[in-house]
Amino acid sequence: MNKGFLSIILHAHLPYVRHPEHDSFFEETWLFEAITECYIPLINVLDRLQHDHVNYSLTLSLSPTLISMLCDDLLRTRYQHHLNKCIELAEKEIIRTRKQPQYQKLARLYRRFFINSRKTYQKYQCDLLMAFKKHYATGNLELITTSATHALLPLLNVNETAVRNQINVGIDTFKSKMGFSPDGFWLPECGYYPGLETMLADANINYFFTDTHGIIQASKVPRYGVYAPLSCDNGVMAFARDPESSTQVWSAQEGYPGDVNYREYYSDIGFELDLDTLSPYILDGKTRINTGIKYHQVTGEGSEKQLYDPGKAKLKAEKDAKDFIIKRQQQIDKLSINMDRVPIIISPYDAELFGHWWFEGPHWLECILRLASEESNKIECITCGDYLKQQTSHQVATPSASTWGEQGYSSYWVNEENNWIYPLLHKATDEMEQLAVDFTGITVSPIQEQALNQAARSILLAQASDWPFIMKSGTTTEYAKKRITDLLARFNFLHDCIRKNRINEQYLRALEIMDNIFPDIDFRDFRPV
Amino acid sequence: MFAINDEMSGGLSTVVPVKKTIEKKISSEKLLEVSKNISLYYAPKISYVSKSLVVLPIDPQKIFVYWNLGDQQAQAISSNEIENELRLRICSQPRTNKKNVKTKLFYDFVIHHSRSSQTITLPTPETAMIYSASLGTKAQGASFIPLITCDDFPAFNGVKKQDESKLNNTVIEAAPATDIYDLVYRENQIDLIKGELFQQDSVFVKNHFASTNFSGLSR
């Protein structure tokens, strides 16, 4: 067996879905589900690993919008209310299924699950960032970030200032909340274009990630394929996704999460029970949504869904984890024949896969990290930051423009469903730049400064890649359309007020409350360099 | 509308702030009202001050182009569309050129005067290309007159099979200036990682989990 490195990167991101103008809002449940099903289980995994003195290595990217929502008081309050409702619903399920012992067993499992979530949340005083910082301090968890609102940077590149601000505001937000600067940067959707590394270097970023073909089609043929990073001309390092380990987890056909023993995502009591039972637990009392309580396993096509067996699923996750490690070892043995250095396998995934889409994902991940730390394995989990400390010489080349989206480029974000946004977005971005130019270097009143900063917030929020993504995926399309048009309308309103020097303070204050992200933003940074 | 504008412009603020008591807390009803009013009266719309032509690369074969000619020009073209065709001209040249070799190609696409954007499919290059774009007019027998141009932009340099039948625009002329390109067959040079490890249409990018609705409503 040859030695090899495995770097697992989890990218945690949600769009900014905070709506204080409503007492409750459907899209906020995205955050609540992610906290309950992904982030808390991940923290519990890290806590157990620490407790057992497992020397693991993992990288977690936290997007600035997610960071902001996790420490927002309104959302914390709403989340606790949501969680209490989940517990209440699970308790009602225990009563409802009292004559169906198999179902009742699962209802009890969910009750325990939600109660444990509440326990962990309260352990960290409703501040999950505290938990991540704690594990960062152990040296086992590397924390990095991404652009301010997860904008797809190649599509913003018509205005360099816009790209620079997405990077810098993102890093500043991370620094302000986490207390240190990130070493690495997660490019949203792995969206890279040649030259982007210049701005990353200006922001003191040492490495970023591209999709596989970003390196395979680099300006020079990569000597080690994707199993060693490339150094851009300015020294910023580019790591590329390994397709083999990706397929094993991501693929709908071959990937682990599709196994028949795993919990079925779509079979949720929110779509099965009668509305009278559900109404206290769904937002408006009548629109069916996921509750998180699911009783069936994937089972397989053409068969009636079987009841979920958590014990069996757990064993399957352990088996799949062993399989993953064995396959990585085989991969490393094959690669080592032709490599004069230790290969590194880059395995990035959306954090929300683990626990939300793939309920057993966190357990699988824990098994991976435990197995990789065992002496008997030649695989060593490592973060990219630590790898770069060990391996200091690299091939120099420029990656090629790419994303990890469908077909490897930008088609998911520029197509008939969403291309209408770009003229509007670019126009507003240019106008913001002009505002910054016109109002820098002159005395501005506090209210003007507030309005200018709020205009900058509106632009950044409108630039999120989530909106065109959702429009293409055809899911909550109306929400995405409304969100981007509302944000651009807010910018237009502020732009108009500022230009005419007629700022309605109440309206400004209302916008500051609704879009309260990036408190330290400075409109002056939106001037061209 | 004027009533709403009055409300929005009430509480005027000049360089010296007007002293006024501002509510520390604003009710959710008021927040919603503010949001609705702004969305209603300040909805984004295209009204450019200056002419522009912007190109966004979509993939190695496609680009998305949008433009604004300005009202005067647009009207002139619209009234004279029979004699003067509006054309989008895309020029391409290899990113790395041999010295003194002219290798520019250009492709013209007829654009209907009412359009302000278009997705263009370009013939697949066999090497990394840089493109430039111009929007202009061409009368029969006359030269192309550019009205607005766009800075050079590099395209994605993935290699795809060319399928002329899928070109979705009318290509009027595709003419090489002189000479031929150097061809770089990247795949053949990758001796370490080949074949199944990288595929343009690989399963994993098509089945990206994040492409599913987060809350499951997509089912």
Image (tube, coloured by chain):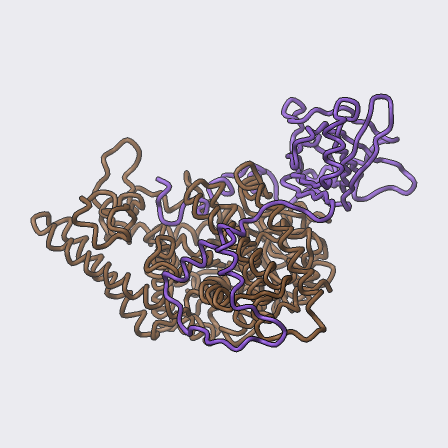
Question: What is the total number of numbered labels drawn onto the structure image?
Answer: 0
Q: Is residue A517 left or right of residue B48?
A: left
In-front residue for pair A80/A359:
A80
Q: Is residue A119 above or below residue B217?
A: below
In front here: A316 or A307?
Answer: A307
Task: Give the answer, above or below, for where B193 lies relative to A144.
Answer: above
Q: Residue at x 63, y 55 (%)?
A: A429
> Which residue is rendered at x = 50% and y = 49% of the image?
A467
Q: Residue furthest right?
A: B100
Residue A377: quadrant of the picture: bottom left
Q: Is residue A383 above or below residue B69?
A: below
Which residue occupies 52% across, 55% down? A487
Residue drawn at x 75%, y 38% is B72
The colour assigned to chain A within the rendered structure = brown
Residue B132: which quarter of the image?
Answer: top right
Residue B131 in view in this figure:
yes
Instruction: Give how far across and how far down residue B191 sits, in percent.
Output: 66, 43
Hey, which quadrant is residue B134 in on the image? top right
Q: What percent of the width, then of the height, locates residue A353?
A: 40, 52
As rendered, which of A359 and A294 lies closer to the eye?
Answer: A294
Whether residue A142 is visible, yes or no, is no
Q: Position of residue A38 (x, y in %)?
A: 37, 59
Residue A461: image location, x then y, percent = 53, 58
- Which colour denotes chain B? purple
In which quadrant is the C terminus of chain A drawn? bottom right
